[in-house]
Image: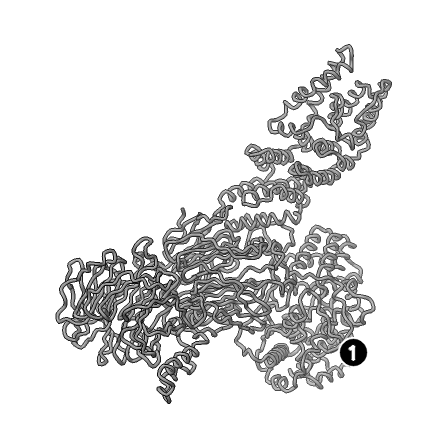
Amino acid sequence: MVKIKQVNVAANYAWSPAENHPVYIAAGTAAQQLDATFSSNAKLELYAVDMADESYTVKCAGTIETENRFQKVVWGSNYTDGAHTSGLIVCGTDKGNIEIYNPEKILENEADCVLTTSKHTGPVRSLDFNNFQKNLFASGANDSEIFIWDLKNPTNPMTPGAKTQPTSAVGALAWNKQVQHILASTSSLTSGPCCVVWDLRKNEPIIKVQDPSGRMQCSDVTWHPDVATQLVLSSEDDHLPVVQLWDLRFATSPMKVLEKHSKGVLSVSWCKQDADLLLTCGKDNQVYCWNPNSSPPEILCELETGAQWCFDVQWCPRNPNVVSTGSFDGVIAIHSIMGGCAPVDSANQNQAQRNKITDAFGSDAFAGEAPNQQQQQPKAKSVPLKKPPKWMRRPCAASFSFGGKLVSFGNNPPAENQHQQPNHRVVKISQVVTEEKLLERSAELRRALADDAQCTDYCRKKLADAQNEFEEDFWSFLKVNFESEPRKEFLQLLGYNKVDLKAKVRDGLNSDAGSSNGLDAFDQIAVAQESKQQEKVFKPMKKSNRKVMRRIPTLAMVGGISFATKLSTYIDSMISQALLIGDYEAAVDLCLHSNRMADAIVVAMAGGPELMEKTQKRYFEANESKISRLLSAVVMKNWGDVVKSCDLENWKEALASLLTYASPDELITLCDELGARLEKHPDLKSNACLCYICSGNIEQLVRSWNNVKPENNSNDIQDLIEKMMVLHRVVEQRSGGRSAASMGETASEKLSEYAHMLAAQGQLNAAMEMLPASSDKISIQILRDRLFHSQGDDVAGYQPPVFPFARDGVRGGQRPEAQVQPRRQVMLVKYIGVLTAHLFDRFVQQPAEPAERLPTNTSNPTSPISLLNQSMVVVNIMHRNTATTDIFVQLISLPRNQMYQPAQQRPAATPNRPQDVNPYARPNQAPTYSAPQAPTSMFTPQPVSMSTPQVPGLMPMPQSQAPSYQPYMAPVSAPQAVPQPMGNPPGPPSNGYTPDAERKHSSGGWNDPPALDPNRIPKKKKPSPQPIDTSQLNMMTPAAPAPTPMGQMMQPGSSPMMQPGTSPIMPGVYPSSAPMQNIPPVSLSPLKTAAAPAPSVQTGALKGAPKAPIPTEHQILQTQFDELIKKAMNQNNNQQIKRKLDECSRRIEFLYDKLRGNSLSPNIIGGLHQVAQSVASRDYAGGLRHHTHIVTHSNFSEISAFMPGLKSLLQIAGQLRI
Amino acid sequence: MVSVINTIDTLHEDMIHDAQMDYYGLHLATCSSDRSIRIFEVKNGTQRLLSTLQGHDGPVWQIAWAHPKYGKMLASCSYDRKVIIWKEQDGQWIKLYEYADHDSSVNSVCWAPHELGLILACGSSDGSISVIKHHGENQWEATKINNAHTGGCNAVSWAPAVVPGSLIEPPSQNQQNTFVKKFCSAGCDNLIKVWSDKDGRWEEVEKLQAHTDWVRDCAWAPSIGLPCSKIASCSQDRQVIIWTSDESTGGQWTSKTLNEFDDVVWHVSWSLTGDILAVSGGNNKVSLWKEKLNGDWTIVSDIGKGQPGSTE
């Protein structure tokens, strides 16, 4: 417990009732004590106990002067509706009065006593409100007087029964907490009963509790909060400083006795919210918190109150974390039972209190005496209760998790589920579905997408269910895509029907033939009947099309300016219609008939030589034409112009003409263009969607939809998704299933939103289906990963997706934390130990081979230590603070014996470096890789020898987690990777993170691989040296003899990144120098001492470390590329290409290792999968394009090791046409 | 519609106080007054106990899974005043880090959005809040907000990672430093407070006052791409309040009472899409709430007393 606030007032007090907010303490000047000023005034004050207020003091919120001082103060809850909403404060005075106050008036400082009664003869020491009838309270005074008051009728109090004999002062009263008509009262007399329990229905005492010892001087009584028959009595007798727990069913002796106080107990308070908490305070200055229900009763917490007794202890009714104590030094202290630290200003408060007393008595009064001094010492942090109170124990909770799952548990009271398994142990996982309609529709859609027949039915159904014109148009347009001749159907939907028109033409011509006045008459009829005729034309159309038609402004006007005006005559419209549907013959007939010879001829030219011939025969009757533009468009096939310049009111005509004439390729762009124009039109924008359906442009469809219907409830999205997906299917079908139509960004976004919605309803698989397959959007990748794995690790039909986050492995703490440097050394020693052990192992296991294979000039070939030295040379060489090429050259030129020199001279300093170098190993992978190759050929004559496999093998430690820092999206542009001149602090590899971050990582988790890349292990670590396959041999050869091949291999990948002339040092090599500069030199000794015993430990540790598998989702990459290499090898006879292939294979191995290490960013991996796909479909040019894309969009250092290899592989594959 | 798909007998020897699924919904962690944490594999309606983590000396109140990019990692807090970060390493759960700098019960732990790094907020009954940040190599640094809630802090919940100004687009990696680091906390002072990181210091930027009793829990709603923040809070006063701040209109917080329940409300949890709120009350009732277009909240499902999962 810790004191959190204090009120400096010598008072009897009461907390405001639990239902009141904010919380107050009502403090009435205590009758039994004098304050420091010896003032005889009396006050009743309200103090606001505001937990949100961080300060230690409690503000006085209202004060009234009163006539009398108080023996007891209680605060009753509101018992009426409205009158006294904050309840009433009832005070017992030392003069025998009971005074009742309205706290709201006190807050206004109005001394307005609601009621004063003077029934009692002596000081009223005890008061208690009934727990059930809030208008009832009991009062007790001297001479065993007890009254029960009804606030509704306060004039006539009743008595609970005949006075107890012998009479004594009533020390305390308590109403039962469970049964409303039971009241307990105590007597301070030791003779007679110490506690009487009254039944107010019978108006008599029902039980008199008599302490068997006969020495109980009862100071306080309180009922068990939950058990009706139990109560607690406290004894203020210093010789019997106990608290007794009685059960009235066995009222001969106390059930339990709480013994701890060393002097009389003055007050008890039982926590209403948790019956396991009982507070007692006594004359020994102690406050204890008990669990009276445990056996034996246990003290959960204690509180030393300082120099003064507490006469009173109370739980705050509203906030059970808070208890208050009233002490004789004039302080009401407020404590938190939760422990913790006291507010900072508590010490000052105590000081202030002391000063006040000193002031009152004069500074001499307490000279030399400092009773409170002990408080000044910083108290040890107080301890909370041994066991948490009930209200801290969360009994139930329901939390959402991915996929609309709800995890819930509830701890029912044991009574409810006795017959079941204990319910408190059960956790339930439930599926929450709130969008049932959505799921239904989604399932329907997915069924429809299964095949064409389903899809057509689906469209038909949708069309039938369409609620408005827009929907109708939409679905009719989508539906016809599944017909045999969609274009024709589109035309029909737009209101053009070839058959109908033919009939019309025939009719027109016939009627004309019969008339004497020929054309004129025809025209007249036409004009007169225009509207009627049109209706006739449209009548045969399907119901659903009628509405489409109605919006067609009469007949087509195709072509620039004339589009704006409608054709006035029927004949023109007939011609237009004929042209729009491509019926040249009819058009020519009409032209001829109306005397438009030129038109006829022009049309006939477009209609082919035969028609041309026919037309020419009737050429002589020439006539003028208003529709030359349309003709020119038709004849010249200049539809772009039409689309650009047509009046949008006539968009249907324009669309119709496109559908009739435009070539499939043109159609798409032209429809899109028309759609784009329509979108800008305020009234027609919804029609843009129809254009996009014709063109199959999903992306534009979605955008345009967003314009038209920006709302976003689940139904709207479903509406759109249905259309998108059907159109997607259409497009797929149009392209002959060749390639899945890719979704644009907006479309992808919608789909991913939709997938999220489905996932939230638990439809993980459906959500997965809806996700656009080929999106590299990170949000989609994240969702896909989550969907996949949450369905278990095996989802039929899907490759495991790439983990879309940069892993950030934290490894745990068996090792001492503080010292970083020693730890590194330990690691180094360890790995050298492993190395030597490994070498040693080899010697022991294969005694014959080493003898053969080791170079004869090795001073002590069988000693592991000498091998250790060898390996150190390699370590040394590989991590020298020079460009690797230089080392390489040096190595080449060094005689074998000299090779050992550097190692012996400074064996410790250099091998320490690998730790630090490691994180930068990636950028210079290729060169460093080459370096160890060189010593290989020098140590031993054979390309693959004893030492070769082992030497690089010692570098990496087995490790499971990729330590590398991997940027979230790796947004890197290539040119930044250009090296800066040596000597300056090197620029970071510019992949979006700061050098700081890089260094942090580079300084390395202890488990980071000590040297190079982990990738390197596997190749070197052949289980045994004997089976050397040829490809491996070939791979080694080019690297070993001379630096030239290395130069070659740098070229393909790195050349685009390198800026000419910046530095002679290769960019890949360069970064390794950076960490070098930051590393403090490491002393020799630890290594030496540690290295010596190393060989004896960890035998075979290296052997045991298996090469990590490539994550299953990427195995396809390995399969594809290895397959390709193999094929190329088989096809090829050219030695040079063969060498190149070996090089490729070696390079690609780096890729596999990176995959194993999971150290590639998602966009690179995505790109690689695309390359692999291209390889699978033998589209090597495509593969190269993807390759270039990766190279230009990724961090050079991340990919430089393998991308060149991949490139030449693709090139070779292309050349060989495999 | 709510249907039970798994019923897991945890075999805890005392009350359960929290149950949390991991990122993929494959692992369930539970914690209890019996001082232990149990980890189950949950798959296709079956479950298997994988581990029992012992390490706390008091009831374990809450557990929280870290983002999977940090591996399998779990934080727990207990009445024993400790916070423990657990990690599965080579198939074994180990104590990665133990934080014991609180003076009273630690009631709540919550991981920051992974975009911000590996950061854990802890609320304690001692009134303070600790923010523990991983600096690599298992080095952790704690920042403490003292006197955050007088009387104790009951819950902490992080705001989703958004970049100011571009709330629509999920942020990319190189924007890491521009993320607003914010969380809310609930306490026995009846308040919800919003804390924001200002140059490495945590500042109280908001004090939300409407509850009239302890605020038991608070939950910051996931971002759904709107420039609007939402916090749900529940209290001893039996109310659930939804607080909203529209950042486009100056970020003033307004409160709306979702409902007044007939018992103490212990826990609120947003669905991952942020459209449904699960409310758990002391009467063991769970109800699901959804916001209507007019901004009112309506109950979509009331899961019966002690029967989470019964359909309605």
Q: Nearer the viewer, residue A529 or B249?
A: B249
Res B262 visible: yes
Colouring of the image: one colour
Chain under numbered label 1: A
As drawn, the residue found furthest toward the bottom would be: A368
Front-most of residues A602 and A301: A301
Residue A197 position in % (x across, y down): 18, 65
The answer to whether residue A837 is visible is: no
Occupied quadrant, residue B79: bottom left
- Residue A249 location (% of width, % of height): 18, 65
A824 sits to left or right of A21: right
Q: Nearer the viewer, residue A1165 or A584?
A: A584
* Residue B259 in the image: above or below residue B27: above
Q: Looking at the image, which is closer to me, A62 or A139?
A: A62
Residue A184, image quadrant: bottom left
Please tell me whether residue A526 is drawn above or below residue A891 in the rendered image: above
Q: How many numbered badges does the structure rendering display?
A: 1
The secondary structure type at the circle numbered 1 is helix
In the depicted structure, whether residue A1049 falls above or below residue A828 = above
Residue name at image x 59 percent, y 59 percent: B162
Residue at mark 1: A890
Against A437, residue A122 (above or below) is below
Q: Whole-percent x and y of residue A699?
A: 66, 45
The three-letter amino acid code for the residue at tag 1 is Gln
Q: Residues within 10 Å of mark 1 (few under 14, many from 20)?
A: some
Residue occupying the point 15% across, 59% down: A202
- Residue A718 x %, y %: 56, 43
